[in-house]
Image: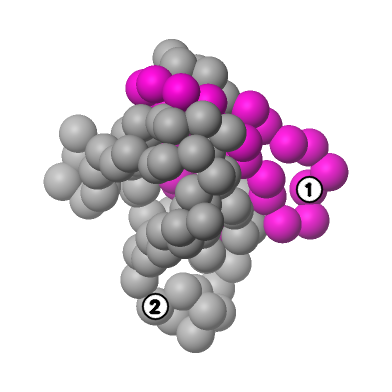
Amino acid sequence: MKPDSHRFDLSLRQDAMLRLPDAAGVNIVCQDGSVWITLEGDRRDFVLEAGDRFAGTEHRHAVIQAMAPSSLSVCATPTPARSLHERNRQHPGLVFEQVLA
């Protein structure tokens, strides 16, 4: 793992949600269970089962919801925003927010 990345493992109970203000550079591996991922402004939805991966490539807000009790590995590598000023204003740092249902 690169020193400039942030990695953590977490468990989500069924229907719990995790919000990511900026999914660019975020890699998610579903270790167990099943999760649903949606990106702001993207018509596609992504469902990850155990062993599946998701790699965020765009600066979009993401919501991850556990469809069953699930375990995830999340690795975030900071990526350049559209402009440094915009990044500092909108996303002052890497923020993960877990919302329990």
Q: Is residue 35 left or right of residue 96?
A: right
What's the residue type where badge 1 is placed?
Asp
Most frequent secondary structure within the magenta stretch: strand
Where 56 falls versus 79 (above or below)? above
Residue projecting furthest to the right: 43
Q: Position of residue 53 (x, y in %)?
A: 49, 24
The quadrant where residue 65 appears: top right
Q: Is residue 77 left or right of residue 46?
A: left
Number of numbered discs overlaid on the protein picture: 2
Could you tell me which residue is drawn at 40 percent across and 42 percent down? 12
- Label pair 2/1, CB-CB below 8 angstroms: no
Q: What stretch of residues is rendered in magenta?
A: 22-47
Disc 1 target residue: 42
Which badge, 2 or 1, comes first in the chain's sequence? 1
Q: Secondary structure at mark 1?
A: loop
Q: Position of residue 24 (x, y in %)?
A: 52, 50
Question: Quick one: quadrant of the N terminus?
Answer: top left
Q: Position of residue 23 (x, y in %)?
A: 53, 52
Q: Is residue 78 left or right of residue 1?
A: right
The answer to if 27 sits in the magenta stretch is yes
The answer to if 29 sits in the magenta stretch is yes
- Which label sits on residue 92? 2
Where 84 falls versus 97 (above or below)? below
Mark 1, Cα crowd under 10 Å, few <14 / some 14-19 / many 20+, is few
